[in-house]
């Protein structure tokens, strides 16, 4: 395999060891090869049990009740969602799932559009602002795919994957994408006079408001932080993702000025709302400080808010204050 993904690096061997029975049927070289195991131990040697005109592997296994004392029932939705995700991440791949415990019809997942279709699927109930952007580039045997689309919402939904593993804690590939996105949008807006002269650059949060994005990287030697493989650590992944995405997204904005204007305006609205909210928070804090903590001890507040009608009296001792309060 050019690239591979897994959770702990032990794969099917653990399934075999933790199953009371496991059967493997391998269609290869015109034959069907078969072997059965019990709790990881072969029942017999590998043998040929028939002919085949196709290729592939079929596995049957039964979880060991002595090990899995509580959870031995598979959740169809969990499996279905993961298989759908894999079909999105590998465009052109067809995956079928059938639950023989019920009368439900089998489902087949096939998405020629890959992660572009994934973005459309996530945004299917939202009001989108433009057609999805998709880019793919390979460099130094590392394949990078990015798809994105803005909607009229305020939340961002960014999902990153490394070798089909959901890196929900992010990592270098996701950082590279975010850096490139912020820089490209600001550069485009400056060059095309979409900012006012004194407007500050948009922040990362500004340009990600209402964004749905999928980043998928296929790396021959992925390095993950920790054993859970939820955060990619390869430093080169940041550089390659940033450069590949930035180059193609810059071209996309240049070739689609109407969409580019929508994207920039979305960021500007987020920026103005952020600045207004910050000013409102600061004003509230100042008012709170004046009302709560600015008159400690024996100080008395003014009866008027008009500075031209107010005076400051400084007296020595309570009695000298008299009826000033």
Image (spheres, rainbow, N blue to C red):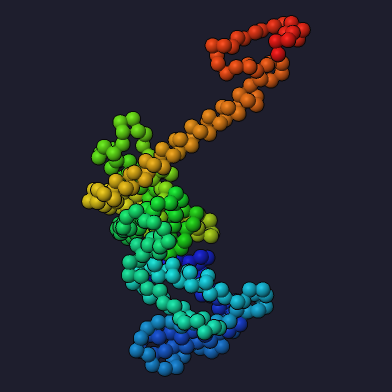
Q: Pick the quarter of the image with the N terminus.
A: bottom left
Where is residue 284, by image quadrant?
A: top right
Task: Say if 309 sits above or below 270 in the image.
Answer: above
Residue 301: percent from left, percent from top: 65, 18
Furthest residue in direction left, as rendered: 255
Asked whether 224 or 264 is in front, the reply is: 264
Visible residue check, residue 42 = no
Please identify the residue farthest to the bottom as the structure is shown. 50
Name the outermost residue toward the right: 319
Residue 247 at x, y percent in the picture: 27, 50
Above or below, 110 relative to 214: below
Q: Residue at x 52, y 30 (%)?
A: 282
Q: Is residue 229 visible?
A: yes
User: Is 26 or 152 nearer to us in this picture?
Assistant: 152
Image coordinates for residue 325, horizontal then vertical, percent: 70, 13
Query: Residue at 33% of width from left, 58% of height from top?
Result: 132
Picture layout, residue 248 above or below residue 88: above
- In the displayed structure image, the side of residue 317 where residue 146 appears, left or right: left
- Residue 277 or 11: which is nearer the viewer? 277
**Residue 47 relative to residue 252: left or right:** right
Q: Position of residue 77 (x, y in %)?
A: 52, 72
For the point 74% across and 5% down, the residue is 320
Please tell me which residue is depicted at 49% across the width and 35% down the height of the picture: 278
Location of residue 136 by image quarter: bottom left
Query: Is 295 on the left-hand or right-hand side of 37?
Result: right
């Amino acid at each position: 395999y050019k690239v591979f993904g897994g959770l702990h690096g032990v794969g099917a061997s653990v399934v075999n060891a933790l199953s009371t029975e496991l059967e493997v049927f391998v269609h290869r070289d015109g034959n069907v090869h078969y072997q059965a195991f019990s709790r990881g131990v072969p029942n017999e040697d590998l043998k040929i049990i028939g002919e085949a005109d196709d290729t592939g592997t079929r596995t049957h296994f039964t979880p060991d009740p002595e090990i899995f004392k509580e959870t031995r029932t598979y959740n169809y939705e969990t499996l279905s969602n993961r298989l759908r995700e894999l079909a999105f991440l590998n465009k052109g791949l067809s995956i079928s799932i059938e639950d023989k415990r019920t009368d439900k019809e089998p489902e087949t997942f096939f998405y020629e559009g890959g992660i572009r279709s994934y973005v459309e699927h996530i945004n299917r109930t939202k009001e989108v602002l433009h057609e999805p952007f998709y880019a793919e580039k390979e460099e130094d045997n590392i394949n990078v795919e990015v798809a994105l689309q803005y909607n009229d919402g305020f939340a961002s939904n960014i999902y990153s994957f490394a070798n089909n593993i959901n890196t929900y804690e992010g990592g270098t590939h996701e950082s590279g994408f975010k850096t490139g996105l912020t820089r490209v949008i600001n550069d485009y807006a400056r060059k095309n006079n979409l900012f006012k002269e004194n407007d500050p650059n948009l922040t990362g949060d500004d340009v990600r408001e209402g964004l749905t994005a999928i980043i998928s990287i296929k790396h021959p030697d992925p390095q993950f932080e920790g054993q859970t493989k939820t955060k990619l650590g390869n430093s080169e992944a940041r550089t390659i993702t940033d450069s590949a995405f930035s180059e193609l997204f810059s071209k996309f904005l240049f070739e689609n000025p109407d969409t580019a204007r929508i994207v920039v305006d979305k960021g500007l609205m987020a920026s103005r709302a952020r600045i207004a909210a910050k000013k409102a928070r600061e004003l509230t804090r100042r008012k709170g400080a004046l009302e709560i903590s600015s008159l400690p001890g024996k100080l008395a507040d003014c009866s008027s808010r008009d500075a031209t009608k107010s005076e400051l009296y400084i007296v020595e001792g309570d009695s000298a204050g008299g009826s000033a309060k």
